[in-house]
Image (spheres, helix red, strand yellow):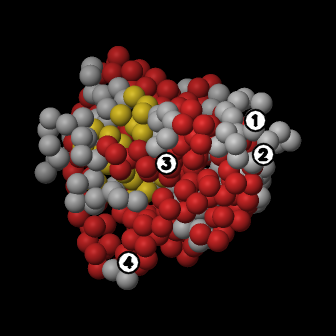
Amino acid sequence: MSEDKKIIFSGIQPSGFVTLGNYLGALNNWTKLQDEYNCLYCIADLHTITVRQEPAKFRKTARELLMQYIAVGLDPEINIMYYQSHVHQHAELSWILSCFTYMGELQRMTQFKEKSQKHSDNINAGLFTYPVLMASDILLYQTDLVPVGEDQRQHLEITREIANRFNKLYGDVFKIPEAYIGKVGARVMALQDPAKKMSKSDENKNNTIAIMDSPDVIMSKFKKAVTDSENEVRMSEDKPGVSNLLNIYCAVTGYTVEQAEKEFSSSGYGDFKKAVGEAVVAKLEPIQKKFHDLENNKDYIDSIIKNNTERASYLAERTLSKVKKKIGFTPKVR
Ligand code: TYM
């Protein structure tokens, strides 16, 4: 890692197919940052077990997620991409920081409230302390910027709180990170229900586009997307379905909202939805091709896992040992 570049950290949970929301809110921005920053991208598998997983499927999803990181254009020679569960310092720092986090702060997290409603039969302590683990991920690497979608903003705020609290007690141990949230694509909504965000774990598959969906499936899901009773392509709060499609279109094409509205000023919703679908298919096609090439290259993927884990562990240990020393833990005798 070059010492003069700022540090970026982010992650995605291997809890299902990567969605267009994950791609536009996170991955797509990551690829733009790799030359300018030192970047670490973890596969946040420790976070994923807050919800029950079937072991074989979980393993497969996590492997595929790493391949998708590479397929979208993240260079594994430049970026450090690794599994969170391979770097034990994450869990260790998480315990330490949980002693610097208040129950009241965690109770306010909207994601906790939402997930405990959705999984009311399994409201485990991990679901509750999840933001502490996420803070640990970020703080372990002295991160400057965290590129995420809008839904993670609150977790970034609590990370900053915890880091400031710790620094006040022990001196400048942690860098205080900032969220990096893109202007377009930061909040992609469900296609059938644009009041809620597009989510990997949605049971209604027509709500989500997976980045590995075939062109036919993508076109058919956009065709079924909810719009409204007008026939006017315009961004507006009272047109959530159309606005979501416009947002997606702008994020994949790079057009501004004004340009897109102009382009569709005389189109009906049918043509508009077709154009959005086609733009998404065109964007995802090269990613899917690269993914399928990687599927046949097991040794290459294994070598990336090995090298990147070592790089991440080295950096994580630097921060963790500093933290332990500051707190006053007894040093190991060698
Ligand atoms: P996860 O796996 O839910 O989502 C991964 C990334 O995708 C973004 N995202 C979206 N962006 C726009 N529209 C959507 N509909 C949408 N859905 C998801 C998320 O904001 C996120 O950037 N806790 C995190 C993973 C994590 C992490 C970290 C992130 C673990 N440790 C440290 C940053 C830093 C999560 O569950 O993301």
Asked if disc 4 and disc 3 are in contact, CB closer than 8 Å, the reply is: no
Task: Classify 10 Å Cα crowding around label 3: few (below 14), some (14-19), many (20 and above).
Answer: some
Mark 2 highlights which residue?
A: 227
Residue located at (55% from left, 76% from top): 56
The picture places residue 300, in percent across and down from the top left corner, at 28, 75
Residue 325, percent across and down? Answer: 24, 33
Task: For the residues labelled 2 and 1, say whether their Cβ atoms are less than 8 Å apart.
Answer: yes
The disc at residue 239 is 1
> In this rendering, is residue 193 above or below 184?
below
Label disc, if present, on residue 253 of the rendered structure:
3
First in sequence: mark 2 vs mark 1: 2
**Residue lying at the far right of the rendered structure:** 229
Query: Within 10 Å of the Cα at label 4, are there few (<14), some (14-19), or many (20+) other Cα atoms?
Result: few
Q: Earlier in the sequence, mark 4 or mark 1?
A: 1
Q: Earlier in the sequence, mark 3 or mark 2?
A: 2
Distance (Cα) linking label 4 and label 1 = 40 Å
Q: Amino acid at mark 4?
A: Asp
Numbered circle sitting on residue 161: none
Which residue is under mark 4?
A: 293
Mark 3–mark 1 contact, CB under 8 Å?
Answer: no
